């Protein structure tokens, strides 16, 4: 986001001065102009200040302004501290030993780089590393005595996602998934809701494979549904390497790919005869995966008091952007949504929120899912696409994978992977969960109720086991009436009056539904 008059201050000034740019956008950028105003844009907020607010023309002055007025951007700070001499931070602290922004900068420098600054002693009151009013933070900060900073960063220096408390994120404190399920139970009854739970699990499994373009593989759909029923909320630690291996095997079954954490490069993309490999996203280096997953695990450990949807979104999108498995990452990432909601008590057993069904419910919603992935992946690819190479020959890696994919900018891209801003992904999942509850689950419960009532209505005057009545109902709904196949299976329906009455019962029973079972 460019400043209107190209007179940037804060992060914008540091970008120009050091020639360092982040791939993820800055939520706030500032400049000097003739009038003081705020301009909201899709990519973030542009603040224009009068000249009286201009910082001194030094890196530390503009860094202090950025920390005070523009917030914390971990990816950029990691890149900045890679080129900004540490002695400049140390001198700043020596001149302002009690200054909160100097101390915060010194703390973040050491936390991000692992290098110790030449600073002996600081003073002043303890200050939070992140302002909990504006960011999701760890619930129990760790006091850093060296800098007199409350370390409330919700991750580790190897992996620390940031979530900004936008109005939508703040509203999640009042978004009660459990209460909405209880309202549905009041509307439909516990029995109908439990009946729908079985179908919702299958629906989620089928839709998840549709996302992976494998919607017709019935055995894999059934296997994923069984894995969700068995493992959701029950694994001691779903991000543990052994647990991931077990879950991957349960979802994928027998595979030629070595299960567990990958030991080879991976990209998300496609192949075509005309253009060869098309790379949409490059995944982090395989040697970093264990430590990055530990950071993701740390986030889930220290944010237990936060709304479950925030935690579920970070678990799901954090996992899929790390892409730690050779195969099955998308399905595991969507499994993690329900796993976190189940662990947090937001969605009780046996319910599974069919979020994949919501994602695939229309072309528009599928495009929204692709866009929320691209919000993170596209800036990374725009910055580092030139480092992709398929011309250096094939190499066999420790996990048995052979690949001609080479990427020469892992270290340069690392801050993007290590410090993702997942705010938009949290906002997206909130909308998906709301639609899932209000439409997918509500409609499934309504369908189960209509089906149950129609079966009872038919059995009032026609004897037969439930499975026979259900086959008749299903066939009439699918064909819009009595089919020849149904007549052969149930010759009694050849009675015209009986057939007409059956058709009318099914029509009446499902009259108020949108259709589809």
Image: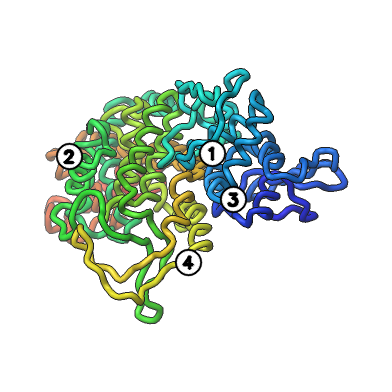
Q: Secondary structure at mark 4?
A: helix
Q: Earlier in the sequence, mark 2 or mark 3?
A: 3
Give the labeled residue for mark 2. Answer: 462
Q: Secondary structure at mark 3?
A: loop
Disc ID at residue 109: 1
Q: CA distance from mark 2 to mark 4?
A: 67 Å
Q: Comparing marks 3 and 1, which lies closer to the viewer?
A: 1
Residue nearest the viewer, comparing 46 with 60: 60
Give the labeled residue for mark 4. Answer: 385
Q: Is residue 206 visible?
A: yes
Disc ID at residue 25: 3
Quadrant location of the N terminus in the rendered image = bottom right
Determine the residue positioned at 16% across, 39% down: 466
Determine the residue positioned at 17% across, 54% down: 219
Q: Comparing marks 2 and 1, which lies closer to the viewer?
A: 1
Q: Earlier in the sequence, mark 3 or mark 1?
A: 3
Q: Residues within 10 Å of mark 4 (few under 14, many from 20)?
A: some
Q: Is residue 336 left or right of residue 109?
A: left
Do labels 4 and 3 touch, CB within 8 Å? Answer: no
């Amino acid at each position: 986001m460019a400043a209107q008059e190209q007179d940037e201050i804060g992060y914008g000034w540091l970008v120009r001065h050091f020639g360092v740019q982040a791939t993820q956008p800055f939520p706030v950028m500032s400049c000097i102009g003739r009038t003081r105003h705020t301009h909201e844009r899709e990519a973030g907020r542009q603040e224009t200040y009068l000249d009286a607010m201009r910082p001194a023309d030094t890196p530390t002055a503009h860094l202090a302004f950025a920390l005070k007025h523009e917030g914390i951007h971990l990816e950029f700070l990691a890149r900045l501290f890679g080129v900004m001499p540490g002695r400049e931070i140390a001198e700043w602290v020596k001149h302002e030993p009690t200054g909160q922004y100097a101390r915060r900068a010194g703390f973040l420098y050491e936390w991000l780089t692992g290098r110790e600054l030449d600073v002996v002693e600081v003073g002043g009151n303890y200050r939070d590393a992140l302002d909990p009013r504006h960011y999701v933070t760890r619930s129990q900060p760790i006091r850093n005595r060296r800098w007199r900073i409350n370390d409330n960063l919700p991750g580790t220096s190897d992996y620390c996602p940031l979530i900004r408390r936008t109005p939508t994120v703040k509203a999640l404190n009042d978004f009660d998934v459990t209460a909405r399920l209880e309202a549905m139970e009041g509307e439909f009854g516990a029995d109908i809701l439990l009946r729908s739970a079985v179908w919702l699990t299958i629906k989620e499994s089928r839709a998840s494979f549709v996302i992976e373009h494998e919607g017709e593989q019935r055995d894999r759909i059934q296997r994923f549904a069984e894995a969700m029923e068995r493992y959701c909320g029950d694994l001691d630690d779903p991000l543990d390497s052994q647990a991931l291996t077990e879950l991957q095997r349960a979802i994928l079954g027998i595979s030629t790919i070595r299960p567990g954490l990958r030991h080879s490069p991976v990209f998300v993309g496609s192949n075509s005869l005309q253009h060869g490999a098309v790379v949409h996203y490059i995944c982090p280096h395989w040697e970093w995966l264990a430590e990055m997953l530990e950071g993701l695990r740390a986030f889930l450990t220290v944010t237990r008091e936060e709304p479950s949807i925030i935690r579920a979104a970070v678990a799901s999108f954090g996992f899929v952007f790390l892409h730690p498995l050779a195969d099955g990452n998308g399905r595991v990432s969507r499994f993690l949504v329900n796993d976190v909601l189940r662990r947090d008590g937001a969605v009780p057993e046996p319910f599974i929120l069919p979020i994949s069904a919501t994602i695939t419910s229309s072309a528009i919603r599928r495009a929204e899912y692709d866009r929320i992935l691209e919000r993170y992946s596209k800036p990374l690819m725009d910055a580092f696409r030139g480092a992709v190479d398929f011309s250096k020959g094939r190499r066999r890696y420790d996990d048995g994978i052979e690949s001609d994919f080479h990427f020469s900018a892992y270290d340069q891209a690392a801050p993007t992977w290590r410090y993702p801003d997942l705010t938009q992904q949290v906002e997206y999942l909130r909308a998906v969960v709301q639609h899932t509850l209000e439409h997918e689950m509500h409609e499934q419960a309504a369908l189960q109720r209509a089906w149950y009532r129609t079966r009872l209505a038919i059995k009032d005057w026609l004897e037969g086991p439930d499975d026979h009545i259900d086959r008749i109902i299903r066939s009439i709904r699918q064909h819009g009436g009595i089919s020849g196949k149904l007549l052969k299976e149930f010759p009694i329906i050849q009675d015209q009056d009986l057939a007409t009455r059956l058709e009318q019962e099914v029509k009446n029973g499902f009259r108020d539904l949108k259709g589809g079972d």
